[in-house]
Image (tube, helix red, strand yellow):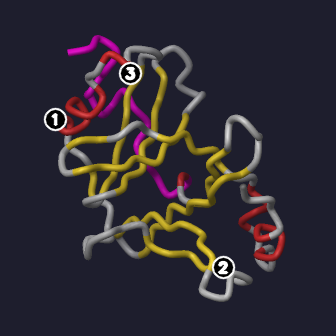
Amino acid sequence: MANNLFVLPRLGQPIRQEDSGIYYILNQQTGRVRSLIQLVRENLHWYILQLQPIADGLDYRWSVMSRENDCVLKTATDKQIAHYFSKPEYTEPVGAWQVMRNADFGFGKFTPIEAPEDISYAILTFEGDEMKTPIRLHKAPAEWLQENNDQDILQLEIA
């Protein structure tokens, strides 16, 4: 097992209501926003949504990220987190992960041990019990969440 992983939940920051909101995936080569993701908590359940164009190509809607009927994200166990991240490619930086997932997609929150205030986020994809490479998410500025701001979000240049 790689020595970068701490599966003790108290070492990592839990996923909280404050983590809900809009995130974006940045194209590293162009610097453009590639995709918008929203983490939503409704009642007691968490969901991941993605902004997608509808049939006419002019309008967009938030769609739940799930290929099956299990849309609700469930908290991953310590054993599952150890299975996902105990690989050589995750040896640095040292830190703790919190993960919620459905059958196909997940949301991860990483708390580095050396700088616990530098939390980062990732969208996770799964094939069965195996996790593919996490994709870094960037939290959108607070003004993206203000009312009547949908037009501004849609005007982003999405690559």
In the image, which residues are magenta? Answer: 1-18
Which residue is disc 1 drawn over? Answer: 79
Image coords of residue 156 (percent x, y): 80, 62
Which residue is disc 2 drawn over? Answer: 60
Image coords of residue 71 (percent x, y): 32, 71
Magenta highlight on residue 8: yes
- Classify 157 as above or below 1: below
Name the quarter where the N terminus is drawn: top left
> Does residue 48 appear to the left or right of 139 in the view shown?
left
- Which mark sits nearer the N-terminus, 1 or 2? 2
The image quarter in which residue 14 lies: top left
- Classify 41 as above or below 127: below
Q: Nearer the viewer, residue 149 or 127?
A: 127
Query: Which SS class for mark 1?
Result: helix
Name the residue type under label 1. Answer: Lys
At x 59%, y 72%, the residue is 52
At x 67%, y 44%, the residue is 26
What secondary structure prevails in the magenta region?
A: loop
